[in-house]
Amino acid sequence: MRRALGRWHRAHGRHDLPWRLTRDPYAVLVSEVMLQQTQVARVRPRYEAWLARWPDAASLTRAPRAAVIRAWSGLGYNRRAVNLWRAAAESLERFGAVPADERELRALPGVGPYTAAAVACFAGGRRTAALDTNVARVTARALLGEAVAPTLPNARLRAVATDWLPSRGARDHQLAVMDLGALVCRASAPACGECPLAGECAWLAAGRPAPPEPPAKAPAAPFPLTARFARGRIVAMLAEGAPLRTEEIVARLPARHRPHCERYLDALARDGLAAPREGRWELAGEGAAQGTSSMASPKL
Ligand code: SF4
């Protein structure tokens, strides 16, 4: 299965993704944090612009936090920008550089099990399973005969995905599994007729049994009605540059969010995204001098 997957990947893999052309742990960390909740097509130009502006952890660390938040604008989940900036500073402080060791990566702000494993594998070549949704789905179907990954205990899935990694070439194998999940073994309508694993796939051999019915969930609120939308709007207002009084922010929010503005601002302050100064709100770190911002930042 590994050999068939490798052959398919050499011919069809997404080899031109810019974060695949580097083994620099900092650059891979930037890409993985951006990709956490944002699609590849949107991340690609933003990743390239980010690396052109801040090519290493030291240059990012020297940037004022407000500049980093502003550069993240439009990617969503702005807290990721602050965490990335803090992670770069803590890496330099504790390890001298962004590490490729999974345990050291886990100690950094905003770096969870998936991101740590992905950086360790893609930058460091370590044999560790990075279980994103694509890897989880392919592993569950091909090796366990399960239609969807969430029905499986994560520890079992991780153990199986780890066993599947070759002792040499774990990086290439994991990228191949990811690409297969993205391009062929899609969540809906998997293209089994084009799949290099079709001859061995446990789920296909079992006749592609339907997954169990997921538990009924209340429909999610439309995005413009959520607190996340309102907080994003506030960050976008502050990113324009001029400090704003609370009343000015309230006036620019959609009516349904106005009564909650104070709560949103408190949450943004807690997340290190906004700060009050002289009766007005601004992006956290606004006006901080280059080179003075990160090492003095509070530890998460
Ligand atoms: S044969 Fe079908 S279900 Fe199995 S891994 Fe390939 S695409 Fe996925």
Image (cartoon, rainbow, N blue to C red):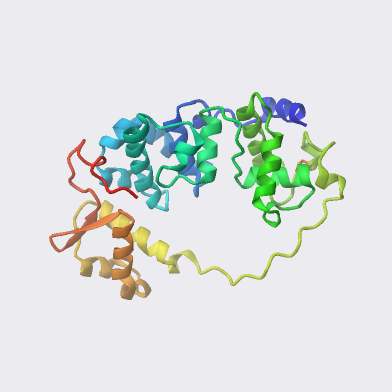
56 sits left or right of 250 in the view: right
**Which percent across, then down, holds residue 141?**
76, 46
Relative placement, left or right, of 99 versus 155 is left
Residue at image position (53%, 29%) is: 20
Residue 215, given in percent of the width and then of the height, sits at 68, 68
Q: Is residue 32 above or below residue 267?
A: above
For the image, the number of numbered tags is: 0
The quarter of the rendered structure image containing the N terminus is: top right
The answer to whether residue 11 of the structure is visible from this angle is yes
Q: Position of residue 19 (x, y in %)?
A: 49, 31
Q: Is residue 44 visible?
A: no
Name the residue furthest left: 278
Q: Nearer the viewer, residue 192 or 155?
A: 155
Q: Position of residue 174 (x, y in %)?
A: 63, 34
Would you say 2 lies left or right of 283 here? right
In percent of the image, x 65 and y 44: which residue is there?
158
Q: Is residue 41 above or below residue 96?
A: below
Quadrant of ligand 1 in image: top right
